[in-house]
Image (cartoon, rainbow, N blue to C red):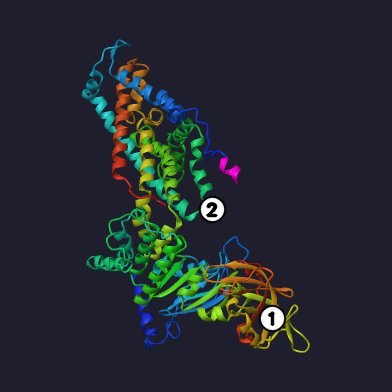
């Protein structure tokens, strides 16, 4: 089994021979570490594909996230990369070599499991030493490397504890140390923060981000939390119903969502069902619109982020300017979220510190370049479930 | 508002407090206590008392002494039987464990959703009367039995052998068979409790199936196997039906002479002393097993 690992690392050194300039943003030009080619997975007994014909390329040193709600296929995708599941169709390439059918223990990939999966009968040091022991690392080398890995995750001093004597956050750190100790080519994280409380989660986010920059290992991070995905990733794939809806950088995903699902799933968005009239004049119901790009279809969906909508007199100079009535107001502390009823449409705008009451008149508007035309997705019901 | 202030606040947990909690606790545990007292403690007190009383020509004299024990341990026959019984019980339980544990491992890891069905099929022999099952071995191993017929038909032997029945080996084979479902059940339960993600985490760390088994699965399931071994040992150590039916003279075990003492020999104190010795030996083995298979960890 060691030979297989050596082979794969040799291959990697060959493929990455033209050294990537360290100044280039990670993920932009690195050699591909993982490639999924036309991968589908249907579980035995299931009639719907959990993952449906997806193509993904994840590059060296990248912090890549797969974002989706439960049942979107994100965990299945991860498990196929780890080797726990085999694709029904398509192939998984690791470092350019077809790894379809290669068992997990022959892959230079480590996983941080959602429930940590620390071996309960082993002390922390034995848990962290386990991958090294399995790789046949010389005895004298194991101890310092375990100490180093534990120091990385600030768990020095816990070597002699058993997993059940640790808190959730500490177990998480040990699991991270165990996954990193063998310096794998690729680290897979399956909702690693899902079981932690909010404060710990924020702390662990920073630990992870810092760690990834420090060790330079490619991270694939699976989560249903859009905040985590946006904050951490160099690039992210938004999955829904087994498909990849969009694959882009966080800023692009947020600023230019490709589909109505992405627009609704990530952050808040006003989705307007629009139509192009015969004169080329677009409108959403009774709201006339000025749009920046010409829609491919006369019927289209427009996504406008609440924070790009200008409220008050300043909006008068904008191409899209409306006067409407305040419906509901949500006080969120740092700002107020105002639902406005404009003709037959209801929009969400952010009113900053200006106070509005239901029934007040309000004026608002946006520049045509801030509205994005998105492709329709079948799953409309998900848009309202704002995370 | 004034009305709300004036209202007396009732505690949210307004449970009737008629019975003091200590008595309540006692009432709750009393059925279990009664059970233990009537079916565990009292019989054993009787057994130990009998073993310390004196036998006078078939009737029991209530004179306290250790003679029953000193006579037993001075007797060559008893020592031989004790050794043989220990050997038979240990060997047959060990064989049963060697068969049942791998079987349970395969059922749990490879049978997927059919594992419950497979487990059921393996323990189904327990539904058949013990006597019938042992009798079946007589049919298999006897002079005109299935095994002899088979060996003859393939030409390996030319006249039926009597070697298969009425020997120590026969008793070991039959008792192995008796112990398998019990060891299986206990092994199966402990293996089934190991979550799938431990297998995956171990594979993920680069361990093959064998090394995963050796370093993760076996240490976690060893206590369960030990319990199965202990049950198997206790069952086979005290057994008297099997040696009586398939053991012959060289297959006699301690259980047979307990039966004799209480029956034909009409020497209850001696029988009780042997019984106590069997229990003590069983407890000793259990203590040893639990000492060597302790597990500090908890499976979450």
Q: Position of residue A207 (x, y in %)?
A: 38, 70
In front: label 2 or label 1: 1
| SS class, disc 1 | strand
Q: Is residue A64 above or below residue A151?
A: below
Toward the right, the furthest residue is A278
Confirm whether the magenta stretch covers residue B4: yes
| Residue B229 shown left or right of residue A238 in the figure | left
Q: Is residue A337 above or below residue B281?
A: below
Viewer-side residue, A385 vs A71: A385
Q: Which residue is mark 2?
A: B113
Q: Are marks 2 and 1 on the same chain?
A: no
| Residue A365 shown left or right of residue A33 in the figure | right
Q: Position of residue B234 (x, y in %)?
A: 36, 34
Name the chief secondary structure element in magenta: helix
- Chain on which label 1 sits: A
The residue shown at (31%, 41%) is: B289
Q: Position of residue B98 (x, y in %)?
A: 37, 46
* Picture quadrant of residue A387: bottom right
| Residue count near mark 2 (Cα–Cα under 10 Å), binned few <14, some 14–19, many ≥20 | few
| SS class, disc 2 | helix
Q: Position of residue A15 (x, y in %)?
A: 40, 84
Q: Which residue is mark 1?
A: A322
Task: Determine if residue B236 is in view.
Answer: yes
- Chain on which label 2 sits: B
Viewer-side residue, B35 vs B212: B35
Q: Which residues are magenta?
A: B1-6
The residue shown at (74%, 87%) is: A281
The residue shown at (56%, 43%) is: B5
Viewer-side residue, B220 vs B250: B220
């Amino acid at each position: 089994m060691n030979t297989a690992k050596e082979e794969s690392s040799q291959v990697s050194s060959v493929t990455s021979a033209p050294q990537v300039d360290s100044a280039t943003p990670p993920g932009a030009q690195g050699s591909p570490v993982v490639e999924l080619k036309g991968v589908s997975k249907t579980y035995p007994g299931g009639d719907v594909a959990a993952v449906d014909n997806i193509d993904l390329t994840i590059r060296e040193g990248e912090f890549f996230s797969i974002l989706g709600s439960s049942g979107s296929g994100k965990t299945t995708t991860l498990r196929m990369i780890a080797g726990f599941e085999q694709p029904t169709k398509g192939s998984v390439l690791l470092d350019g070599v077809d790894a379809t059918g290669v068992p997990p223990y022959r892959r230079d990939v480590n996983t941080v499991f959602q429930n940590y999966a620390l071996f309960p009968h082993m002390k922390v040091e034995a848990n962290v030493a386990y991958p090294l022991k399995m790789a046949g690392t010389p005895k004298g080398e194991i101890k310092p490397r375990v100490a180093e890995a534990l120091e990385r995750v600030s768990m020095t001093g816990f070597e002699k504890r058993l997993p059940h004597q640790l808190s959730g956050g500490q177990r998480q750190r040990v699991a991270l140390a165990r996954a990193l100790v063998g310096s794998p080519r690729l680290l897979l994280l399956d909702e690693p923060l899902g079981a932690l409380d909010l404060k710990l989660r924020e702390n662990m986010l920073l630990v992870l981000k810092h760690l990834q920059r420090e060790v330079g290992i490619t991270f694939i991070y699976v989560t249903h939390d859009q905040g985590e995905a946006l904050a951490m990733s160099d690039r992210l794939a938004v999955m829904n119903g087994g498909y990849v809806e969009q694959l882009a950088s966080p800023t692009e995903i947020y600023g230019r969502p490709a589909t109505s699902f992405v627009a609704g799933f990530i952050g808040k968005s006003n989705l307007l069902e629009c139509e192009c009239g015969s004169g080329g004049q677009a409108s959403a119901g009774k709201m006339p619109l000025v749009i920046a790009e010409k829609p491919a279809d006369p019927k289209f969906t427009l996504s406008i982020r609440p924070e790009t909508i200008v409220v008050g007199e300043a909006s008068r100079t904008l191409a899209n300017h409306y006067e409407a009535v305040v419906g509901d107001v949500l006080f969120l502390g740092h700002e107020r979220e105002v639902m406005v009823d404009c003709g037959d449409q209801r929009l969400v705008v952010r009113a900053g510190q200006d106070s509005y009451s239901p029934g007040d008149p309000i004026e608002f508007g946006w520049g045509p370049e801030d509205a994005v035309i998105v492709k329709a997705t079948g799953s409309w019901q998900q848009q309202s479930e704002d995370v | 508002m004034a009305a709300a202030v004036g209202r007396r606040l009732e505690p949210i947990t307004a449970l009737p407090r008629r019975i003091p909690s200590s008595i309540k606790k006692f009432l709750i545990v009393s059925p279990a206590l009664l059970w233990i007292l009537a079916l565990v403690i009292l019989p054993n007190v009787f057994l130990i008392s009998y073993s310390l009383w004196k036998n006078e020509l078939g009737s029991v004299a209530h004179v306290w002494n250790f003679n029953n024990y000193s006579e037993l341990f001075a007797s060559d026959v008893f020592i031989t039987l004790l050794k043989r019984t220990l050997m038979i019980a240990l060997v047959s339980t060990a064989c049963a464990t060697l068969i049942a544990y791998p079987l349970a491992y395969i059922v749990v890891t490879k049978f997927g959703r059919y594992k419950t069905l497979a487990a059921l099929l393996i323990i189904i022999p327990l539904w058949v009367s013990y006597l019938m099952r042992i009798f079946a071995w007589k049919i298999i191993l006897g002079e005109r039995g299935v095994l002899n017929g088979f060996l003859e038909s393939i030409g390996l032997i030319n006249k039926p052998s009597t070697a298969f029945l009425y020997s120590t080996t026969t008793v070991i084979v039959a008792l192995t068979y008796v112990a398998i479902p019990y060891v299986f059940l206990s092994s199966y339960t402990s293996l089934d409790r190991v979550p799938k993600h431990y297998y995956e985490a171990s594979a993920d760390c680069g361990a093959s199936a064998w090394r995963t088994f050796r370093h993760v699965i076996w240490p976690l399931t060893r206590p369960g196997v030990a319990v199965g071994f202990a049950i198997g040992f206790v069952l086979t150590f005290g057994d008297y039906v099997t040696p009586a039916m398939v053991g012959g003279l060289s297959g006699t075990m301690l259980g047979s002479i307990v039966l004799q003492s209480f029956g034909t020999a009409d020497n209850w104190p001696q029988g009780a002393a042997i019984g106590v010795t069997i229990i003590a030996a069983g407890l000793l083995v259990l203590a040893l097993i639990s000492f060597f298979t302790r597990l500090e960890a908890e499976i979450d």
